[in-house]
Image (cartoon, rainbow, N blue to C red):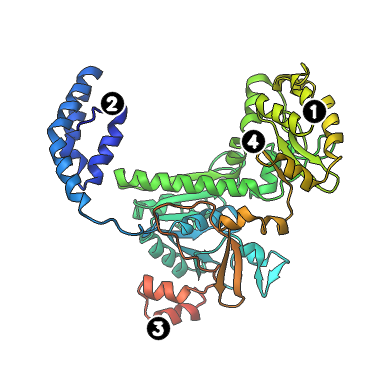
Amino acid sequence: MFVILKTAKIHNLSQMFTNSGNRLNSLIGLRKWHSHRSRQSSSNYYNYFLQEARRNFKYYTKATKKQETISAPAQIKPPLNGVKILDMSRVLAGPYCTMILGDMGAEVIKVERPDVGDDTRAWGPPFVSSESCYYLCVNRNKKSITVDLKKPQGVKLIKELAAISDVLVENYIPGKLSEMGLGYPELSAEFPHLVYCSITGYGQTGEYASRAGYDVIVSGLGGLMNITGPADGDPCKVGVALTDLSTGLYGVSAILASLLSRQQTGRGQHLDCNLLSTNVASLVNIASNFLNTGQEGQRYGTAHPSIVPYQAFKTSDGFIIVGAGNDSQFKILAQCIGHPALASDERYATNKARVKNRDVLLQFLFKIFEEKSLSDWLKIFENSGIPYGPINNMKQVFSDPQVLHNGLIQEIPHPTIGKVRVVGPAVRYSETKTVEPTAPPLLGQHTHHVLKDILGYSDDAIEKLKKHKVV
């Protein structure tokens, strides 16, 4: 059997050959194709590629038969197994980024200030024993080493770690690390393989580059707070630092892309991740409304500017949130609440009409939802096909059957607390092995291990560094 692959399927054929253990270049003459590409029409190119594929198909079939006799391993290693991350970040965006990389199997070495550590170690209450709950939330699967960057020997240690690392993540004010000889220009000159991810408030250049950046400040400047809160109230902060978290996620994706790029080029690169760019990029439909029509963003409480109904409703004893994302769902909603005629009313028959007549429709729905309890409404909407759910507090969240089923609570042994509970990774992998989680480290817990077992320092040399308060 031979499947004819068109141009759009080149990647699949490449993958097919690569998975059989053969090099793509030798199998399908890709280098030869590159040399001919500029002087061939698309039709000739297709015919050329097809001939090359046919010529080499026998190699693929032989490799496939051989491969079928080999038993696949029970589990593949974690996705980032063998990748080393030098984490020079603190607070939330950077540590969240590196924690996710650690969840994927990377070895993360967290660099902290001697005697002080990450700022969040002091953020509380609440504390568990002497550990800040805030610090515990984003620092699992890491090794902590303390280094004084004001001392030349401390800078030397960082360079030694950078030399054996794949990725460096930092969130210093732009230019600060370059003053120590640890900026991207300095380290990339010595270690061109290094992927260097800078997470800042506003970017590496520009009028605001030298400003310190915190989530709540940037969410105000970036417009998020202006569209958050009740319609008749003041701007509100989102309940968690979403701009920080989103920037950390952008950092993860940029790092992974850069590691893939490095496989082709052999070189790392500088990644400029910042809270402001993330915040503005996350405005999505609100930004699109303004950029294309001039429509200003507004505060709608829990409601949606372009979909009605799509918000929270007060019941007789709690709150439920219900959404009708299309006209079919609104028809079901109308039936569930006992007023099917709403769906045929010309004022509400389409979403456009419902948005136009928002106030009248919502006043009616507010009265309807207050007539029954939350549990009654949850039973009514169950299996209806429309989006709905309760508004839970933390106790309800972490006793929810789906949250428990998804394995989102991890209990990890801790050297001083006994056991610490954290929210686990949000993604499951069907094939790759998951990482056995380790507790957020104590300050400097792994300094001796990193210096001796990773960098090769002798016990005497380590004691000398401690004596001079380098570590």
Residue 45, relative to residue 438: is it above or below?
A: above
Task: Name the residue nearer the viewer: 215 or 153.
Answer: 215
First-in-chain label (4 vs 1): 1
Amino acid on which the number 2 mark rests in the picture: Thr
Which residue does the image show at 61% across and 61% down from the upper left?
137
Upstream in the sequence, badge 4 or badge 3?
A: 4
Residue on which the image places disc 1? 339
Q: Which mark is residue 7?
A: 2
Q: Which residue is mark 3?
A: 460
Q: CA distance from mark 3 to mark 1?
A: 81 Å
Residue at left offset 23%, top offset 30%: 3
- Distance between the Cα atoms at labels 4 and 3? 68 Å
Q: Which sits in the foreground, 109 or 463?
A: 109
Above or below, 267 relative to 360? below
4 or 3: mark nearer the eye: 4
Residue type marked 1: His
Q: Which residue is mark 4?
A: 385
Q: Is residue 306 visible?
A: no
Q: Nearer the viewer, mark 3 or mark 2?
A: 2
Label 3 to label 2, Cα distance in Å?
62 Å
Q: Amino acid at mark 4?
A: Gly
Q: CA distance from mark 4 to mark 2?
A: 40 Å
Earlier sequence position, callout 2 versus callout 1: 2
